[in-house]
């Protein structure tokens, strides 16, 4: 046996009979060397070929029976129940109803503005009533801010005691740190959850029973021209949608004020033009009358001239040229 044959036998002995009998030449060399490969790898007698075959089959079965890694099961998703679907339907129905109410309120206010461009009191009243209805509030007041003081311009559902207080108070300057003062200083929306918890009691609480309240400024650019004040008589914060709606009404109120100012300005110019036209018409009508008066005076002068000439001739007995 050659040297390479011994190396092959040693390699086969090391790696088992399954490799040995894959190559018949190596198997024969192994038998010639007298190596009992079956006993070497724990065989129970018999030929090495049989033992090697069994070992080869076991290795193949072990190779083919490797377990596959299973993917983790996806979490089971529970579908929406009938109660969940009903809850979603109710929410969508409420949102649709609110949107329709807001659209109707805005359309009504715009209609009042177009029909009564110069009647601010009527426009303010329509805006305030719609804002209170959409917000589900108890009462509200629209204040104008002019010359550094507030004064009520429209009121809706104000309790009688609070309305009497406002009438007695008249115009008032905002107090720094109080609700009107904060609004005048910041020119932003003021939202008070419970006015009854403020350190100083407000007249709206004492006379009107107000609790939750919002103050929404009316701004012409950066200039404060008024404010909406809407009140609940219970602790019920206003929603973001309600506040946005009142802000929209406040912007429309500013437009209405500007429209009224332009209408007054146009009416003033029109009045002047009408008066000037009347004066021109009077002058034109008086011109023929003056001409007729002048003609009559000339005719009277023409008659008086010859009469005076005759008188002078009779008196002095001579004719003199007299210019009349």
Image (cartoon, helix red, strand yellow):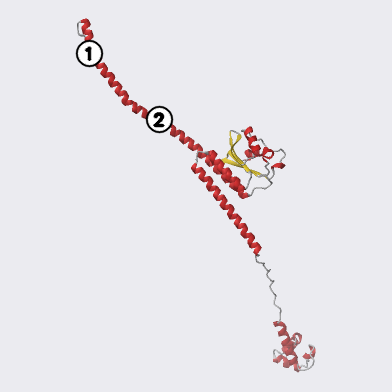
Disc 1 element: helix
The dot on residue 276 is: 2
- Image spot of residue 270 (x, y percent): 43, 34
Label 2 and label 1: CA atoms lie apart by 46 Å
Q: Is residue 310 left or right of residue 105?
A: left
Q: Mark 2 or mark 1: which comes first in sequence?
A: 2
Discs 2/1, front: 1
Q: Which of these two is toward me, 296 or 172? A: 296
Tell me: residue 288, above or below residue 114. above
Q: Residue sitting at 22 percent across and 11 percent down?
A: 309
- Image spot of residue 164 (x, y percent): 64, 35
Residue 7 visible at all: no
Q: Residue sitting at 61 percent across and 55 percent down?
A: 94
Tell me: residue 131, above or below residue 147. below
Q: Residue sitting at 71 percent across and 42 percent down?
A: 196
Q: Which of these two is toward me, 273 or 7? A: 273
User: Number of numbered discs present?
Assistant: 2
Q: Is residue 290 left or right of residue 151?
A: left
- Image spot of residue 84 (x, y percent): 65, 62
Residue that lies at the very extreme toward the top in this rendered image: 316
Question: Which residue matches tag 1?
Answer: 306
Tell me: residue 11, above or below residue 85. below
Q: Quadrant of the N terminus?
A: bottom right
- Image spot of residue 220 (x, y percent): 55, 40
Mark 2 nearby-residue class (10 Å; few <14, some 14–19, many ≥20):
few
Residue 101 visible at all: yes
- Residue 47 appears in which quarter of the rendering? bottom right
Q: Quadrant of the C terminus?
A: top left
Disc 2 element: helix
Q: Is residue 157 left or right of residue 198?
A: left
């Amino acid at each position: 046996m050659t040297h390479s044959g011994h190396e092959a036998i040693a390699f086969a002995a090391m790696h088992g009979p399954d490799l040995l009998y894959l190559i018949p030449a190596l198997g024969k060399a192994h038998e010639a060397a007298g190596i009992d490969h079956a006993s070497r790898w724990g065989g129970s007698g018999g030929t090495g070929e049989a033992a090697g075959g069994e070992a080869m089959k076991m290795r193949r079965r072990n190779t083919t029976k490797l377990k596959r890694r299973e993917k983790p099961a996806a979490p089971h998703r529970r579908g929406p129940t009938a109660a969940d679907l009903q809850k979603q339907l109710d929410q969508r129905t409420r949102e649709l109803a609110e949107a329709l109410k807001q659209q109707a309120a805005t359309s009504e206010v715009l209609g009042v503005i177009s029909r009564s461009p110069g009647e601010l009191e009527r426009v303010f009243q329509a805006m305030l009533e719609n804002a209170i209805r959409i917000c589900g509030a108890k009462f509200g007041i629209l204040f104008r801010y002019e010359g550094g003081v507030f004064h009520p311009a429209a009121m809706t559902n104000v309790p009688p005691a609070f309305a009497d207080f406002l009438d007695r108070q008249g115009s008032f300057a905002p107090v720094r740190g109080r609700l009107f003062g904060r609004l005048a200083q910041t020119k932003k929306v003021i939202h008070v959850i419970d006015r009854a918890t403020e350190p100083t009691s407000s007249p709206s609480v004492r006379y009107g029973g107000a609790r939750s309240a919002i103050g929404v400024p009316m701004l012409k650019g950066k200039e404060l021209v008024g404010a909406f004040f809407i009140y609940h008589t219970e602790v019920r914060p206003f929603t973001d949608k309600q506040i946005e709606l009142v802000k929209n009404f406040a912007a429309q109120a500013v437009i209405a004020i500007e429209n009224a100012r332009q209408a007054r300005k146009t009416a003033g110019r029109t009045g002047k033009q009408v008066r000037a036209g009347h004066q021109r018409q009077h002058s034109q009508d008086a011109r023929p009358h003056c001409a007729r008066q002048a003609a009559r005076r000339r005719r009277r002068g023409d008659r008086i001239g010859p009469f005076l000439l005759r008188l002078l001739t009779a008196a002095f007995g001579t004719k003199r040229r007299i210019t009349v």
